[in-house]
Image (spheres, rainbow, N blue to C red):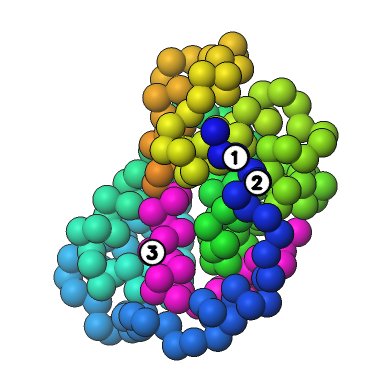
Amino acid sequence: MATSADTRPYDIEAREADILGKPQRVESLREEEFSPEARALVRDIHGTLGVESTSVPDVFGVMLRHPRLFKCQMDAGIVFFQGEISPRERELAVLRVAWWCKAPYEWGEHVDISKRYGVTDEEVERMTQGSDAPGWSEHDRAIIRGVEELLGEQMISDATWDVLARTWTEAQLVEFPALVGAYFATALQQNSLRVRLAPDNPGLSYR
């Protein structure tokens, strides 16, 4: 089964030039352009996240071109952030998805998020090498290999499943493929729309 060999080191500068060096394909809505549905959604998101600011990140402005889809994505994101898989393990999976997809926005944002939940600088660097890199625990390696198998083969192998099942509950095992699929979809969307990096997001070079 194909794994991390499918993600050999790549040229970060060339990849970011292809995504970020060209115009964003769908421009972010200005707040005065928000529909009533979009305004209500922003209020709901801020309320759920406990955010007092009324400002909206540019990436939200892009997604608010399709409020119903954005609501579904945000609802799913909240489920995963409050999910059965621990925050650190969730972020290991998301980082591997982002690096596999060569996704500057997703990678940069989740390097930052992952460090809040205990992922180290060394582990972030090691993530660029995948599950074959030395230094992972057996369980962490299985999470990363599971991502690689899901993206490369569209299923988890028996060997990887058996390692995960030693310590994960059935609910966590059910959640894992959905988590990977959701962040894979986000990477495809952000890459294809050529979403611009936030000012504090260094992109694929971030460690």
The residue lying toward the viewer, choosing from 45 and 146, is 146
**What residue sits right under mark 3 in the picture?**
189
Provide residue 195's location: percent of width, then percent of height: 46, 74
Mark 2 and mark 1: span between their CA atoms? Answer: 5 Å
Mark identifier at residue 5? 2
Q: Which residue is depicted at the point 40% across and 44% down? A: 181
Q: In the image, what residue type sits under mark 2?
A: Ala
Mark 3 and mark 2: span between their CA atoms? Answer: 24 Å
Q: Mark 2 touching mark 1, by CB under 8 A?
A: yes
> What are the residue bounds of the magenta stretch?
183-207
Q: Which residue is depicted at the point 25% across and 73% down? A: 65
The residue lying toward the viewer, choosing from 50 and 169, is 169
Q: In the image, what residue type sits under mark 3?
A: Gln
Q: In the image, what residue type sits under mark 1?
A: Thr
Q: Which residue is depicted at the point 23% across and 64% down? A: 67
- Quarter of the image containing the N terminus? top right
Provide residue 117's location: percent of width, then percent of height: 66, 41
Instruction: Describe the element under mark 2 as helix, strand or loop.
Output: helix
**What residue sits right under mark 1 in the picture?**
3
Provide residue 72's location: percent of width, then percent of height: 27, 50
